[in-house]
Image: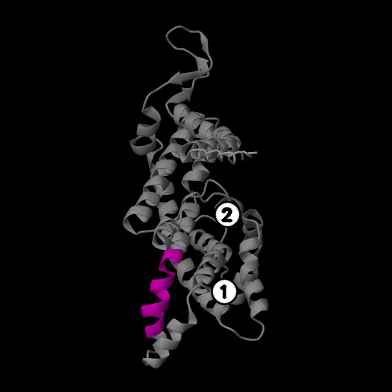
Amino acid sequence: MSTTTEAPPTPSPPPPRQSRRAGAGRLAAALVTPTMLVLALVVAYPVLAAFRLAFYQKKDGIDPETGLLEQGETFVGLENFTDMLVGDAGDRFRNALFNTTSFTVVAVSIEVVLGVLMALVMHRAFKGRALVRAAILVPWAVPTAIAGLLWRWIFQADGVVNKVLDLETPILWTTDGFQAWVAVVIADTWKTAPFIGLLVLAGLQVISNEVYEAAKLDGASPWKTFWAITLPLVKPTLLVAVLFRILDTLRMFDLPFTLIGPGKDATDTITVIAYEEAVKFGKYGPASAYSVFLFLYVAVVAFVFVKLLGADVLGTRAGKKGR
């Protein structure tokens, strides 16, 4: 009597790798789509609308040729931009551009120095370090509008600053003039230097102590250690922090607006004059032209930092080194 044994079932082959990749790609697209739709609604559409509006002007009034009442928008081409650069609004725009650039260069330079010093202090181990860290980071947590009102009270004619200086004639910090420009720089430095300090502190904490121990064995002084070890190793983080601060300062609006007020030659920025053109005068076309110029200005600065200075904003270089 013979017995027959059935062959074990043949296992089904695994699905091809390409199909798994396609399925993962569809899943990733489905997960990202809601976010992309929200970004398109709140970012892409306003940007495109501002670009379109920059080529139009509001026309409300009597047409001198037809004698009819005109309402709505009229396409004017590059008239808003030419008027902004060389026309009637040219002087105010160039002054606002100078203020915006000077605020950025001076304030960010001071903030970098103070931020690095803050990071070095917060990185050292000493008694009460947690309290020092909290005290340093408090200004950054204060909303900018509140910080502007706080410094407006400090810079009053009978405020704290004039009391400390104890001059015969008090300085009118919140009026138009160079002192108003200085007041904005001081307030912005107090508000945002801790931001740079916080990012630099994060960069300092990933540096191995063995590097500093080796430098001590080689007889390196603290100053030489800072320039030869600390600064080069923290440079990628510092460049990203400086880039963020530059882009933020170029768009400065709420601090000079609340501290000094609009319509001041010493503290008018591009965002302030764009706000006035749109809200105060109802000229949305010129206001959009200012905004488009600032958008391109910020884009150029970001490109210079990323391409020429090597700011690794997305962390791609670190990822490539890790692989």
Q: Is residue 167 above or below residue 272?
A: below
Callout in the foreground (1, 2): 2
Report if residue 319 lies within the magenta region: no
**Distance between mark 1 and mark 2 Cα atoms:** 29 Å
Is residue 156 among what the camera can see?
no
Q: Are marks 1 and 2 in contact (CB under 8 Å)?
A: no
The one of 35 and 183 positioned closer to us in this rendering: 35
Could you tell me residue 189's position as x and y percent?
53, 65
- Residue at point 46% right, 65% down? 237
Q: Is residue 146 above or below residue 63?
A: below
The one of 11 and 90 positioned closer to us in this rendering: 11
Give residue 124's quadrant in the image.
bottom right
Highlighted range, magenta: 224-238
Q: Which residue is mark 2?
A: 255
Q: Which residue is mark 1?
A: 168
- Residue at point 38% right, 72% down? 232
- Residue at point 35% right, 38% down? 85
Q: Is residue 199 above or below residue 75?
A: below
Q: Quadrant of the N terminus?
A: top right
- Residue at point 65% right, 56% down? 143
Question: Would you say 213 lies left or right of 9 here?
Answer: left
Residue type, mark 2 in image: Leu
Is residue 205 among what the camera can see?
yes
Residue farthest toward the left in the current orientation of the protein? 308
The one of 138 and 285 positioned closer to us in this rendering: 138
Question: Would you say 300 lies left or right of 257 here?
Answer: left
Closer to the N terminus: mark 1 or mark 2? 1
Residue type, mark 1 in image: Glu
Could you tell me residue 26's position as x and y percent?
54, 35
| Disc 1 secondary structure class | loop
| Disc 2 secondary structure class | helix
Q: Quadrant of the C terminus?
A: bottom left
